[in-house]
Amino acid sequence: MNTPEFWTPADAEAVTLGAGVVKRPTRLADGRELIYYDDAGTTLPAERAVDARVLDPRPATATMRQDVLTGDWISIAAARQNRAFLPPAHLDPLAPQTEANPSEIPDRYDVAVFENRSPSFGPALAAATGDAPAAEDAPHGLDDLADPGLGRTRTSVGRCEVVCFSPEHTGSFGTQTPTRARTVIEAWADRTAALSALPGVEQVFPFENRGEAIGVTLPHPHGQIYAYPYITPRTQRMLDAAARTSDDLFARILDFEQGSERMVLQGEHWSAFVPFAARWPIEVHLLPHRHVPDLAATSDDERAELAPLYLRLLRGIDALYDSPTPYIAAWHQAPVHDGREAVRLHLQLTSPRRAADRLKFLAGSESAMGAWIADIPPETQAERLREALATVADPA
């Protein structure tokens, strides 16, 4: 094997974040951004191997089309057809590179974040920034996107990033240690702030898909972050609800649920509950006790509690059926510019698993009409989850 080249970040490039996590930015061979986030007390050296691959140019930025019946914008991202699909472990594209595996990450790491090779949004932005070009037909703000019309298109500006929780080939966020979970939380917060500052980005969304039943194509423990050029339909409905009621709607929801039998886990700074109108067989919401618009706005104390509490919640969900449960863990954050006093950061964790060997499929009513029918009463599921959580040891 050829001797790899190494680089050492200058002092100005290496940044210490909360809890002693160290951020080390670099670039991949095709210019995409790669950021290493080192655990507090990591055993890794500062030096990292250079990405010496010869890569094809990045695909052109996708185009969005407007559905005039709903106003929704659909990104047509054909390059996503080329992404990896359940590769063998020795060709894991998220593992550290070896001579036999020219993966996306050139060296060993604790947590790594990099720009997706086949993104749904970006790399073009509303204005040229760093190595990102300006889009020829970028959205002209939210008013432009809200204006309905037949045949309307815009460039899918924004950013899509992959967040690797561990160099291991299998696992999930819930299989990490509290120290590693805190590193990921610091990475989420740091990337939320950075992506929110990009031209044309209106909302930032960190999430984790887990399990083949969800559609996961890589078993490597990882999540993603999407930086959208619009406010997503789900968030717009939250804003509409707050406008019809009051800006303190999330505080009122938290008070309502904390006094209910749907509560499943509570700390000093966070509460987890099965929502009153849960759609999915397993659905849990996790809210901070004070109003914060996004992960970047959370305090050191809130992040410190979140790491073990979130791990315990995920392990409790696995304990429901004594086996790994497929889920989508969605971190809803306020839009970058609008509604930051109305939308509170919260996790929405959902799973289609309705029994040990059964899944809920979205058929006619849910898929076509958006009219949900729940299979399990929320109070019943909350009781089951509390019982499962009682069997779970504190994360270590």
Image: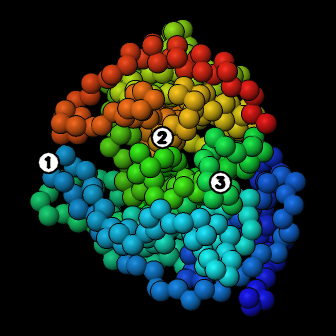
Q: Residues within 10 Å of mark 2 (few under 14, many from 20)?
A: many
N-terminal-most mark, 2 or 1: 1
Rendered image quadrant of residue 319 = top right
The residue located at (55%, 61%) in the rendering is 162
Whole-angstrom CA distance, mark 3 to mark 1, is 39 Å
- Label 3, on which residue? 165
Looking at the image, is mark 3 or mark 2 earlier in the sequence? 3
Mark 3 element type? loop
Query: Residue at point 68% right, 77% down?
Result: 98
Secondary structure under the numbered disc 1 in the rendered image: loop
| Quadrant in which the C terminus appears | top right
Task: Identify the residue under disc 2.
Answer: 326
The residue indicated by pointer 1 is 69
Q: CA distance from mark 3 to mark 2?
A: 17 Å
Q: Position of residue 175 (x, y in %)?
A: 66, 43
Q: Residue at x 65, y 86 (%)?
A: 52
Up-down relation of residue 95 to residue 306 (above or below): below
> Pointer 3 and pointer 2: residues touching (CB < 8 Å)?
no
